[in-house]
DNA sequence: AGTTGTGAATCTGTTCACAGCC
DNA sequence: GGCTGTGAACAGATTCACAACT
């Protein structure tokens, strides 16, 4: 089933996902067609970049006219694997975990949080937002039973490495890691490390030197 | 005061901030020195990359020995502008906003959330975690009075563009934007767009094609 | 006239490989 | 012997610029 298109730059993949949001917003504003220039403008990219990104996967536009928004939305969604729903587990129901469990954007893109894992006895066995909470020790068993595709990790850093190893061992191949411990990807596993303090730190780098 | 080191790759800046976390963790484990190889290994980078990143800013290591962790921590912190504290405002106290207001990692890196802004009448005028909550309309006045350096935006997308324009007009030069609307940077302003659903979407791209 | 799609040229970032120092 | 620091070589991503199409 996987259809390879040759090698795709990682930055292209990240931008595709931005285009989806831009297209949804243009659609809400009543637009039917959109040019590469307009997509670029809204995001601070260049129009050539938008066209090149899309060209890796095919021809979706009409010369002189631009892109049909509905068609392009559907095409990019398919490219990103969003033409199906994905079962997501959340590990760690702290403040960030709650935010993730409540995140509106997931539903729209096809992600369903199917199970939550934590170690706090007062949480385990209950439900949050209708989603069952299990003990982290149960992860391998439950993940297999439910068919979890992706795990989001939002736990303290001291147990991060061990927990993520167990997640990988249990057969889950996609990991979105919010902990302070950045985990290298490895054969067969897709890991994305996101660190919120890091994001602020790249901002201060530029602010501190007045170069921006 | 800003000391220019020539042009620095954006990826170098992002990795520096990862190195800080790695160094802190090594330090907690009782290490005093660390090699570029060890830093690389823990994060899935290459040792040459670590050395090259640091070489943009000076020589921090000892040949044959590696890097003194305390010294390197201090050096990188200074490079990233973390040798001072930064005043941060949070706009939007929804689920994600609450997570940001409670985020432990900020304190450690020198970020203090000094004010929260929202539009809900039941929140405005109260405090959250000891941080005062103001109406978003008050942002320009309060931001100036407090001396806000960076604004974190965690509001629904429909009001994102307008709110961010007002933040920029009020003189804040650093923005961490969590909304679905990605905002282009512009002269004099540093903007970082972070989208959590996007992160999942780049994972599914690879999962969907079995290529990882 | 307007806009796409794309090879070629350019620019940016990474890796190699080794001299130099501890 | 081990590890850094770095110029040179390489790989990867972006931009240019224009032919092709509506």
Image: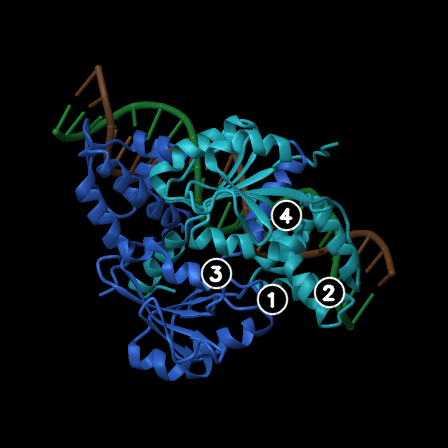
Chain colours: A cyan, B blue, C green, D brown
**Residue that carries the numbered disc 4 in the rendered image:** A112
The lab-note entry on whether marks 2 and 1 share a chain reads yes
Q: Chain of mark 3?
A: B
Where in the figure is residue A73, as x and y percent of width and height? 73, 55
Q: Residue at x 47, y 51 (%)?
A: A97
Residue to which mark 3 is pinned: B96
Which is more foreground, mark 4 or mark 2?
4
B147 vs A110, nearest the viewer: A110
Can residue B212 be seen in the rendering of this structure? no
Residue marked by disc 1: A42
Q: Residue at x 18, y 28 (%)?
A: B65
Q: Nearer the viewer, mark 2 or mark 3?
A: 3
Q: Position of residue B160 (x, y in %)?
A: 54, 71
Position of A79 with respect to B134 (left or right) is right
Q: CA distance from mark 3 to mark 4?
A: 18 Å
Around disc 4, counting alpha carbons within 10 Å, would you say few (fewer than 14), some (14 to 19), or many (20 or more)? some
Residue lying at 43% horizontally and 62% vertically, measured from the top left: B98
């Amino acid at each position: 089933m996987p259809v390879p298109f040759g090698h795709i730059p990682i930055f292209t993949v990240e931008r595709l996902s931005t285009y989806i949001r831009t297209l949804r917003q243009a659609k809400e504003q009543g637009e039917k067609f959109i040019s590469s220039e307009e997509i670029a403008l809204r995001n601070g990219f260049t129009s050539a970049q938008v066209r090149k990104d899309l060209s890796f996967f095919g021809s979706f536009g009409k010369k002189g006219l631009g892109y049909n928004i509905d068609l392009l939305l559907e095409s990019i969604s398919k490219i990103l694997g969003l033409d199906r729903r994905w079962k997501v587990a959340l590990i760690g129901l702290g403040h960030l975990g709650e935010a993730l469990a409540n995140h509106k954007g997931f539903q729209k893109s096809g992600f369903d949080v199917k199970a939550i894992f934590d170690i706090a006895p007062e949480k385990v066995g209950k439900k949050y937002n209708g989603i069952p909470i299990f003990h982290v020790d149960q992860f391998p068993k439950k993940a297999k039973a439910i068919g979890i595709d992706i795990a989001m990790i939002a736990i303290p850093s001291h147990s991060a490495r061990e927990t993520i190893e167990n997640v990988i061992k249990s057969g889950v191949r996609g990991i979105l890691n919010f902990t302070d411990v950045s985990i290298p990807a490895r054969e067969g596993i897709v890991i994305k490390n996101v660190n919120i303090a890091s994001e602020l730190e790249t901002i201060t780098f530029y602010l501190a030197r007045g170069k921006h």
